[in-house]
């Protein structure tokens, strides 16, 4: 279950090697009409141009960087983080009841959780996927001055699945930067499968063939610099009025792995 709170869970990250990315998509992205997704596998069964990570198929577009987020204690993949430029979105698919409506429940829990953080600002707004949650949490800037970490939480109820995205970086607070991330999220394909899963259970994620951990700069190994956050969501960069926004970095978690 990935909707608990008040626990810290470490994660480590592996990066998709460039040779596993589709060279045709890396060469350039064709214009895509306004999408109505994310989609169920029955609506988009084709695999060309997609990275298969189990319950999710990720559209490979120009300049996309893919990370698989791992729960350190179990080495289970708990999310896929997609980065385009200075923006990112973490995608997770969960089992949902046939009646749907899980996003309404989850939104209420996110609002309550963020509101309990001293000095945080949180509310609902209308976005590309309907009602979403926008959150700002007080945080120190790299130079120690006060600032904010920001995030947008989006959700889509599908047939017996629920897909959540946590937007970080510039797309979390700049409308002009959100379009590419929204389009990427809308093209994700969810494969729930026929196995029984209780509502809210994370649908299985698996690494693509030939996947290998890639050390980040300054790391001795892929696990040496494991993040201390790693819950079911992540937030974006610090934003501070009157100052230049720094490069995106992981922020405090809103909902957590239980």
Image (cartoon, rainbow, N blue to C red):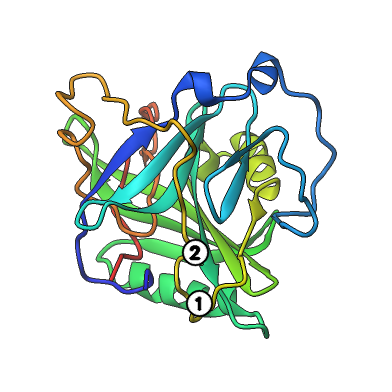
Give the residue at x 79% y 47%. Answer: 35
* Left or right side of 191 for 13: left
Q: Mark number for residue 197?
A: 1
Q: Residue furthest right?
A: 33
Q: Quadrant of the N terminus?
A: bottom left
Q: Position of residue 246 (x, y in %)?
A: 35, 28
- Relative depth, front residue between 151 and 234: 234
Q: Position of residue 237 (x, y in %)?
A: 37, 39
Q: Residue furthest top?
A: 27
Q: Is residue 32 above or below residue 255?
A: above
Dot 1 crowding, Cα within 10 Å, few <14, some 14–19, many 20+: some
Q: Is residue 66 above or below residue 74?
A: above
- Relative depth, front residue between 90 and 67: 67
Query: Quarter of the image holding residue 177?
Result: top right
Give the residue at x 74% y 54%. Answer: 37
Q: Which residue in the structure is indicated by mark 2?
A: 203
Q: Position of residue 57 (x, y in %)?
A: 61, 46
Would you say the residues marked 2 and 1 are in contact, meaning their CB atoms lie under 8 Å apart? yes
Q: What is the number of callouts on the image?
A: 2
Give the residue at x 81% y 34%. Answer: 32
Dot 2 crowding, Cα within 10 Å, few <14, some 14–19, many 20+: many
Please report whichever mark, 2 or 1, sits nearer to the chain's N-terminal start. 1
Q: Is residue 185 above or below residue 64?
A: below
- Relative depth, front residue between 234 and 9: 9
Query: Quarter of the image holding residue 135?
Result: bottom left
Q: Residue furthest bottom?
A: 99
Note whether residue 41 is visible: yes
């Amino acid at each position: 279950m990935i909707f608990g709170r008040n626990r810290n869970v470490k994660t480590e990250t592996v990066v998709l090697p460039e040779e596993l990315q589709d060279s045709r998509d890396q060469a350039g992205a064709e214009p895509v009409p306004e999408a109505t997704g994310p989609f169920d596998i029955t609506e988009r069964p084709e695999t060309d141009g997609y990275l298969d990570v189990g319950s999710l198929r990720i559209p490979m577009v120009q300049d996309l960087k893919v990370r698989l987020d791992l729960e350190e204690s179990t080495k289970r993949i708990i999310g896929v983080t997609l980065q385009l430029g200075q923006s990112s979105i973490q995608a997770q698919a969960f089992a949902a009841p046939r009646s749907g409506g899980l996003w309404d429940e989850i939104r209420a829990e996110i609002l309550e959780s963020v509101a309990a953080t001293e000095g945080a600002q949180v509310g609902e707004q209308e976005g590309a996927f309907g009602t979403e949650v926008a959150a700002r949490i007080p945080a120190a800037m790299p130079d120690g001055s006060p600032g904010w970490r920001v995030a947008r939480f989006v959700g889509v109820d599908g047939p017996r699945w629920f897909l959540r995205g946590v937007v970080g970086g510039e797309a979390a607070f700049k409308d002009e930067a959100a379009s590419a991330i929204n389009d990427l999220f809308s093209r994700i394909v969810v494969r729930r499968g026929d196995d029984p899963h209780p509502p809210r259970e994370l649908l299985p994620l698996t690494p693509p063939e030939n996947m290998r951990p890639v050390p980040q700069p300054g790391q001795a190994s892929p696990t040496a610099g494991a993040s201390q956050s790693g819950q079911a969501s992540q937030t974006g960069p610090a934003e501070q009025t009157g100052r230049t926004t720094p490069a995106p970095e992981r922020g405090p978690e809103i909902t957590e792995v239980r």
